[in-house]
């Protein structure tokens, strides 16, 4: 037997599971079942695609056994299993970069924190919330040696050789005295129905079955009623996305979300779509209620699972959906992709690209429907994900117009945000210019910028964009339909002869003063001039955009200098 230390980060997470995360303990079942399901998915794919696994007899199933005397709960799968190396690296260290994010994101609020467990791929450790000892017996498909991994969650684990018929993994949890509820069949069944009803493999468990008394013709009891133990399937195991929409209840959609998103929160919306024709595929996408914690990290986890004709392929492929839709959770399933598809093939595969493009269009049009039909829901969506969606304005040129139509804008004249289709109704039909101002500052500060004075005086509305990303994105967005987007600093207004004359006169009469200013400021400014841009403010600073020094400064800023 060999003793091993948990890696420091793994230990930190273990401690957290044991000592601080007490609410919502039931999710340990969801996490272990989800691992079992992943292990079945992996073997399923190998059996179908890899000659090495041709000989493996594979009958995918998960079994749950509760032993009240021994106070143990066992979850067993006939999946891929683990060899010694797998055990050491998967159940002892946490190699994934998500872990750090997990630890950084802990809030101390138990409900929120326990929601993070599955999101960050530290699910296995959840069993230590309820167990003081865990034994994992496992044998990898196609290999000879089985192993037993044991830990009491106190910083160490053991690995030793053992024997096992067939491949797969069995996890035995010795439950703490106060966790006896997890040995009750009906409690387990409720949890499975809630979180794992629609994983694509069957889960079996022993249940008491009531056999009524047998009576003869006179009504005399010949055999008393009794209970019999029956091993039954407790989940539906029907890959939900394959069922037709009309047969799925809202509850089922929500339950499925909780199993694939590892979340106990309800989704904000979902979109289920079956495409038939040249390419057949099904997508089921969910919009979460809250932004995933790692949404603005480069190493964010993707939320889309790719299946090929119900065979799981990957959930770690960032190319499946554009990054500006990275908040989506869900499934893409197609019959028309080759099963042995590799990552490289996937990225350049014409069918995959078609599915991707059509899916993006579908998602955008569904979002637009929500915006039109349920503005309250849309506002919630936009508050959480608006800034991510906005990235699409520069990364997805082909859909720019649609994405622009999904934006909610602050403007000078409106107290609530407006959408661009509304906004253009008030744009001068001859000039067809949409003016905007950007600046990373508060909305009220930006709204009172001197650069807006002449617009206010003329009664022209302006988009007020005060997010940092706006300053980078909007200079690149130059058009919307037949309209031009023009920065307020670049707006030019026709002046009548009289106005021009008046301005020249003003300039002349202040020539002396302007010169005095210039002399006083010296090289700190390029020139001092009078302007008709301002109405209330006495002066403003204006950048000379043609000046190479200015352009250099802007470039440095964009590169984050
Ligand atoms: P995640 O599932 O997000 O990878 P977990 O902490 O739940 O994170 O599991 C860690 C790893 O342990 C899994 O990725 C997998 O490689 C391995 N593992 C866990 N349970 C099983 C199982 N039942 N069969 C095979 N491998 C498993
Ligand atoms: Mg897991």
Image (cartoon, helix red, strand yellow):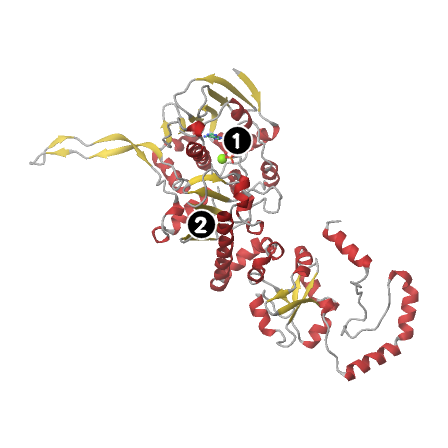
Q: Splitting the image into 4 quarters, where does residue 347 fall?
A: top right
Residue 18 is labelled as: 1
Q: Nearer the viewer, residue 197 or 318?
A: 318
- Mark toward the viewer: 2 or 1: 2
Q: Circle 2 is placed at which residue position?
A: 283
Q: Residues within 10 Å of mark 2 (few under 14, many from 20)?
A: many
- Is residue 44 depicted above or below 464 in this figure? above
Residue 196 drawn above or below residue 409? above
Q: Position of residue 373 (x, y in %)?
A: 47, 63
Q: Is residue 520 left or right of residue 106?
A: right
Q: Is residue 176 visible?
A: no
The reply to whether residue 208 is visible in this rendering is: yes
Where residue 127 sits: x, y (%)?
48, 31
Disc 2 CB within 8 Å of nearest ligand 1 atom: no
> Which residue in the rendered view is the most extreme toward the bottom?
498
Q: Position of residue 433 (x, y in %)?
A: 65, 71
């Amino acid at each position: 037997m060999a003793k091993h230390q948990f890696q420091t980060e793994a230990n930190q997470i273990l401690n957290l599971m044991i000592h601080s995360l007490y609410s919502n303990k039931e999710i340990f079942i969801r996490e272990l079942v989800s691992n079992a399901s992943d292990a079945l998915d992996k073997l399923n794919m190998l059996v179908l695609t890899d000659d090495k696994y041709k000989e493996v007899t594979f009958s995918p199933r998960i079994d749950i056994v509760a032993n009240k005397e021994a106070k143990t709960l066992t979850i067993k799968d006939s999946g891929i299993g683990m060899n010694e190396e797998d055990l050491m690296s998967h159940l002892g260290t946490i190699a994934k970069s998500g872990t750090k994010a997990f630890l950084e994101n802990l809030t101390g609020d138990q409900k929120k924190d326990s929601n993070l467990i599955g999101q960050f791929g530290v699910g296995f450790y959840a069993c230590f919330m309820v167990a003081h000892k865990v034994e994992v017996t496992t044998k990898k498909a196609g290999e000879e040696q089985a192993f037993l991994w044991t830990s009491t969650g106190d910083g160490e684990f053991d690995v030793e050789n053992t024997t096992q018929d067939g491949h797969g993994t069995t996890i035995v949890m010795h439950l703490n005295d106060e966790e006896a509820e997890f040995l009750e069949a009906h409690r387990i069944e409720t949890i499975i129905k809630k979180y794992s009803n629609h994983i694509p493999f069957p889960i079996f468990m022993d249940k008491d079955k009531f056999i009524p008394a047998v009576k003869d013709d006179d009504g005399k009891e010949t055999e008393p009623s009794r209970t019999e133990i029956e091993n039954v399937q407790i989940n539906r195991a029907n890959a939900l996305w394959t069922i037709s929409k009309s047969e799925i209840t809202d509850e089922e959609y929500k339950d499925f979300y909780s199993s694939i998103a590892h979340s106990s929160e309800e989704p904000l919306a979902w979109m289920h779509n079956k495409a038939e024709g040249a390419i057949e595929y099904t997508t089921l996408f969910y919009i979460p209620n809250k932004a995933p914690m790692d949404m603005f990290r480069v190493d964010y986890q993707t939320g889309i699972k790719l299946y090929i004709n119900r065979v799981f392929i990957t959930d770690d492929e960032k190319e499946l959906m554009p990054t500006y839709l990275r908040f989506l959770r869900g499934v893409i399933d197609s019959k028309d992709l080759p099963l042995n598809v590799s990552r490289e093939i996937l990225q350049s595969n014409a069918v995959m690209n078609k599915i991707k493009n059509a899916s993006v269009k579908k998602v955008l049009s569904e979002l637009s429907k929500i915006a039109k039909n349920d503005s309250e829901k849309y506002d919630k969506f936009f508050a959480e994900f608006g800034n991510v969606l906005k990235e699409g304005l520069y990364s997805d040129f082909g859909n720019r117009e649609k994405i622009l139509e999904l934006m909610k804008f602050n403007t000078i004249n409106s107290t609530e945000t407006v959408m661009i289709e509304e906004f253009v109704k008030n744009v001068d039909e001859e000039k067809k210019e949409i003016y905007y101002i950007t600046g990373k500052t508060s909305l009220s500060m930006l709204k009172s910028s001197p650069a807006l004075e002449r617009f206010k005086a003329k009664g022209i509305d302006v988009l007020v964009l005060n997010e940092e990303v706006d300053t980078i994105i909007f200079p690149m967005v130059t058009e919307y339909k037949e309209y031009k987007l023009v920065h307020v600093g670049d707006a030019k207004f026709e002046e009548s002869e009289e106005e021009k004359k008046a301005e020249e006169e003003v300039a002349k009469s202040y020539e002396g003063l302007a010169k005095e200013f210039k002399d006083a400021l010296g090289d700190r400014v390029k020139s001092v001039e009078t302007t008709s841009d301002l109405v209330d403010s006495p002066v403003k600073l204006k950048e000379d955009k043609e000046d190479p020094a200015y352009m250099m400064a802007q470039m440095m800023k964009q590169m984050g200098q």
